[in-house]
Image (tube, grey):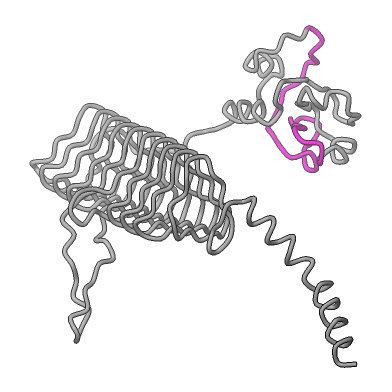
Amino acid sequence: MIPLADIAQHLEVAREDLPTLEVTGVNTLEDAGPSELSYLAEERYVAQAKSTKAGVLLVSASLADVEHSAGFAIVVDDAGHAADRVLDLFHTPPSAPAAGVHPSAVVDDSAELAEGVAIGPGCVVGARTRLGRGTVLHANVTVGSDVAIGENCRLFPGVVLYDRVMLADRVVLHANVAIGCDGFGYRFDGQAHRKIAHVGTVVIEDDVEIGASTTIDRGKFAETRIGAGTKIDNLVQVAHNVRIGKACILCANVGVAGSTVLGNGVVLAGGAGVRDHVTLGDGVTVAAFSAVPNDVKAGETVVGAPAVPQRDFLREQGALRKLPDMMKQVRGVLKGFKK
């Protein structure tokens, strides 16, 4: 429980009329109870605000005049962002192994472990691998040889780093991420698909977070690189020699084919796919389930399969909606000719 006064102070809200209330958590408008906090950030939720049982309601300034049934309301610039900040107060980080090496872990004698490194049960750390200060390996993490991991990284259970992978600082890899797998490269010689060796690596820059069961393949010659601050969702596939810029967002089930280049701030919505050797400029957005076959200019939003600029897609969809009426007109004209 957190006193409402402490929450207001955390949000830098000055109110002298705050009720004495111990807030037990954050919840939706529909499910919040008298001791919980909720928020109203969008007009489409006004009806729910009118019937909410929340004890405290954060309200965006643009909706300050909306009627609600909450016990007490606090107006903020953006209620959604404010609620996210309140969640920080209630968040308990996942438990981590204690600093040191668990007795069941296998760490090569040549590995270098900096101060404060924690290696959990069942982990394997290969030869000549370096782990930076404060890095945590949860249970059953496998780290190959000649791997470099920076400071304050966190690798959750089941993560696998193949040989010669490099992580910078504050990288978070969620459960069962696999980095450094061979790229999907084969050459048909007339009789069989012969495997092409991939001798490159993967470089993950500072402050990257990668969701559960995502896979990132090593480069064929050089490196696959994920830029600083990029966030990748669960179940994403990044192929060999892909270069992803800074502060990109890749949502669930995205697939990026080999040697593709993403600029800074690119957003790939859920299920989107990008073919090989394509370049997406800075700030490109690819809509959900779209398939990108060609280069996209900076700042463009593309939609569809194959993906086209959003304005063209909307025009095409508008024309398709008119198609049934147009067909009726065509049939009428054809009947006239037959007479």
Residue positioned 85% across, 37% down in the render: 46
User: Is residue 80 depicted above or below 260 in this figure?
Assistant: above
Q: Is residue 165 left or right of residue 6?
A: left
Percent x, y of residue 62: 79, 25
**Residue 211 position within the rendered picture, expressed as x and y whole percent measured from the top left:** 44, 48
Q: Is residue 311 above or below residue 63?
A: below
Percent across and percent down for residue 5 are: 70, 14
From this viewpoint, which residue is outermost toward the top? 16
Secondary structure, magenta segment, majority class: loop
> Which is more toward the observer, 139 or 241?
241
Q: Is residue 18 left or right of residue 229?
A: right
Residue 320 falls in which quadrant of the image? bottom right
Closest to the observer: 227 or 1? 227
Q: Residue at x 62, y 51 (%)?
A: 310
Question: Which region is colored magenta?
Answer: 16-44
Quadrant location of the N terminus? Answer: top right
Location of the C terminus by quadrant is bottom right
Q: Nearer the viewer, residue 100 or 286?
A: 286
| Relative to 14, residue 142 above or below | below
Name the residue rendered at 65%, 13% in the picture: 12
Q: Is residue 236 left or right of residue 287?
A: left
Residue at the spot x=55%, y=32% of the render?
91
Indicate left or right for 42 with 214 as reference: right
Task: Say which quarter of the image contains residue 184.
Answer: bottom left
Residue 181 shows in this picture: yes
317 vs 74: above or below: below
Can see residue 104? no
Q: Is residue 110 magenta?
A: no
Percent position of residue 249, x then y: 48, 43
